[in-house]
Amino acid sequence: MKNIFIMVMSGICMMPLLTACGNSADTVHTADLFAMDTYMNIKAYGKDAEAAVTEAEARIRALEQTFSVTNDASDIRKINQADGQPVTVSADTVSVLQTAQEMHHESGGALRISLYPVLRTWGFTTGAYSVPEADEIAELLQNVDDTKISVDGQTVRCPAGMEIDLGAVAKGYTGDAVMEIMQAHHISSAIISLGGNVQTRGSKPDGSAWTVGITDPFAPDMLIGTVSVRDKAVITSGNYERYFTGEDGRRYWHILDPADGYPADNGLVSVTVIGSCGAECDALSTALFVEGTEQAVQHWRRNGDFEMILVTSDGELLLTEGIAADYNAKNEMPCRVVQRNEEP
Amino acid sequence: MKNRKIIIAVGLIFFVSVCLSVYILRHSDRQTVEIVQDGAVLYTFDLNRAEDQEIRVTSAEGGYNLIVIKDGTICISEADCPDQTCVKMGVLKSDYLPIVCLPHKLIVRFAEGEA
């Protein structure tokens, strides 16, 4: 009897030791890097984590070169300088172009990668911000037409005078590429953050879901809430990410409406898309931001393989029904859950 | 006699485990922050114990950030980068929102940050 008592007591006494050791069972490897004009952080757990993270870093650097609009050797630079001639590009570029074209179609033209010259004249690609003259924007818009980009196998042709930029899709695609590397290395637990994009593989090593913070667009140093996900991309486009204040005191942000070439102001200040494919979520977050509140909700009802968290310019939070249960509010913003079937 | 030995043994084990528990709990009370530049950890602090101080970090291109630790908080109070995003972030508040200075490749974050 006494022996049993001693064993039980010893067991209880050993507990703190056991819990302290439990956490170190998984090897974690992390890396920070600055690429694609943003800060990225990769974290992977498992036996092969170090090799996976090292390979992921190299892949990110390579994709950064491929998608760059300034590097002369990049696919995009070659397309933009081809003056209407066909250019052979990598499979990565073809894949991103196809995602952009699909999203252009699905969003009724809200996403246009050929908007690049307009984005540049606003200074959003260079940091030399200024409000362009209206006729300058009108002139540049004449060469904005994604339907004229042809992709045939690995050959791409853009009309002379058109320039493209994959900024709205490239980071999401890069996240997908990193997750493929994690899979190849049998990593069952990984998370990557690329600026406003977070992509997760599996769950945390303890089996619980990853929690991803959603930035408050009205106070970007705070969160409006967190969302719990497994195996998902959580990708946000917000008007707080890149903007400047003009001489007129107005705020101008980097997500432009292809309809007029001015910052998209259709009722939304932040769009978070949650789904399986990073490239699609990335393209969607930009497209839905441009579409505006009502159109975004209709878009979600038509193509339901994603969920979204919308913040409207008048300070309301809209959650689609598939994500509402996984959302954990961190502030008092009024919140409404959007149902799949339209309310009568 | 045998009883006393057992009591002493159990008492010892209990005492040691209480000490360990206290140590581990104190350990988890740490709030470790890292200052990372271009992938290299420059400094690590326990915010709950660090003395108030200012740290000037110079970037490879010659720019600087002034990092201030005060009353258990950390922020970038001054920088000569064009966007000033790092200064506008204020004090470090959350695992989810590291303070980042893109032009100087500088990060201030909690060491156990998740995303």
Image (spheres, rainbow, N blue to C red):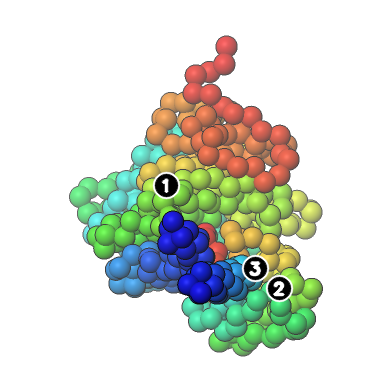
Task: Name the front one of labels 1 and 3.
Answer: 3
- Label 2: which residue? B48
Judge whether residue A256 can be spotted in this image: no
Tag 2 near tag 3, CB within 8 Å: yes
Mark 3: secondary structure: loop
Q: For the point 46% across and 48% down, which residue is it?
A: A209
Task: Name the front one of labels 2 and 1.
Answer: 2
Q: For the residue carrying disc 1, how many other residues have a C-alpha within 10 Å: few (<14), some (14-19), or many (20+)?
A: some
- Label 1: which residue? A230
Co-location on one chain, circles 1 and 3: no
Q: Which residue is more in the foreground, A197 or A296?
A: A197
- Amino acid type of disc 3? Asp
Q: For the point 58% across and 47% down, which residue is it?
A: A226
Q: Which residue is more in the foreground, B81 or A131?
A: B81
Co-location on one chain, circles 2 and 1: no
Q: Which residue is more in the foreground, A309 or A266?
A: A309
- Label 3: which residue? B29
Judge whether residue A99 can be spotted in this image: yes
Q: For the residue carrying disc 3, how many other residues have a C-alpha within 10 Å: few (<14), some (14-19), or many (20+)?
A: few
The answer to whether A8 is drawn above or below residue A111 in the figure is below
Q: Quadrant of the C terminus of chain A?
A: top right
- Amino acid type of disc 2? Asn
